[in-house]
């Protein structure tokens, strides 16, 4: 969610119109609109006043998944050539050490065979290209993981 969208949601949650917020802050309605559409940003004093008006902390007001946006921007800027050079197992193993360890502990052959069978099934049944079938399978694994995470 962008900062502007976050400001919009906070205002709506409190039931204020743009005109009401503008009047309370001593700015124009257009200024509020520009903040909410990410055309401009409120300065720190205005942000603090918005936080007080909306009944949230300044931190809550300006927290808007910047990390997610930055990651998405980095992905969008990265060429396939660079992506192909990255050792993804090594990169992710810094966060998840098991990725650097399991190869010496797990007989992967049976899992590889089963995954190959599932990939071929997706390719045949739905006409997916190899990479698309792999991405679908990866997404199915993510769904299974989420489901397991939410089980009591």
Image (cartoon, rainbow, N blue to C red):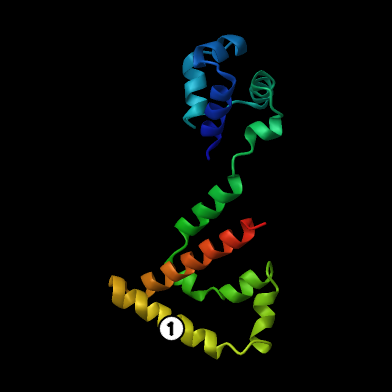
The quadrant in which residue 95 appears is bottom right
| Horizontal side, residue 133 vs residue 138: left or right | left
Residue 33 in the image: state x and y as whole percent.
Answer: 47, 22
Residue drawn at x 56%, y 35% as measured from the top left: 3
The quadrant in which residue 99 appears is bottom right
Q: Nearer the viewer, residue 68 or 150?
A: 150
Q: Residues within 10 Å of mark 1 (few under 14, many from 20)?
A: few
Q: Secondary structure at mark 1?
A: helix
| Horizontal side, residue 113 vs residue 123: left or right | right
* Residue at the far left in the pictured view: 127
Residue 40 in the image: state x and y as whole percent.
Answer: 51, 29
Residue 17 in the image: state x and y as whole percent.
Answer: 51, 15
Disc 1: which residue? 116
- Total marks placed: 1
Residue drawn at x 67%, y 79% as measured from the top left: 100
Residue 29 in the image: state x and y as whole percent.
Answer: 49, 15
Vertical position of residue 69 compared to residue 116: above or below: above
Vertical position of residue 63 compared to residue 23: above or below: below
């Amino acid at each position: 969610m962008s900062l502007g969208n976050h400001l919009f949601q906070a205002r709506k949650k409190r039931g204020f119109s743009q005109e009401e917020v503008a009047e309370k802050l001593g700015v124009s309605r257009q200024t509020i609109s520009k903040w909410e559409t990410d055309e401009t940003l409120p300065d720190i004093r205005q942000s603090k006043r918005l936080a007080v008006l909306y009944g949230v902390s300044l931190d809550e007001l300006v927290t808007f998944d910047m990390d997610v946006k930055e990651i998405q921007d980095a992905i969008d800027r990265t060429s396939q050539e660079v992506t192909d050079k990255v050792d993804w197992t090594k990169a992710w193993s810094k966060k998840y050490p098991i990725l650097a360890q399991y190869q010496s502990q797990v007989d992967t052959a049976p899992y590889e065979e089963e995954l190959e069978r599932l990939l071929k099934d997706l390719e045949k049944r739905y006409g997916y290209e190899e990479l698309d079938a792999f991405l679908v399978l990866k997404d199915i694994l993510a769904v299974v993981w989420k489901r397991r995470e939410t089980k009591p």
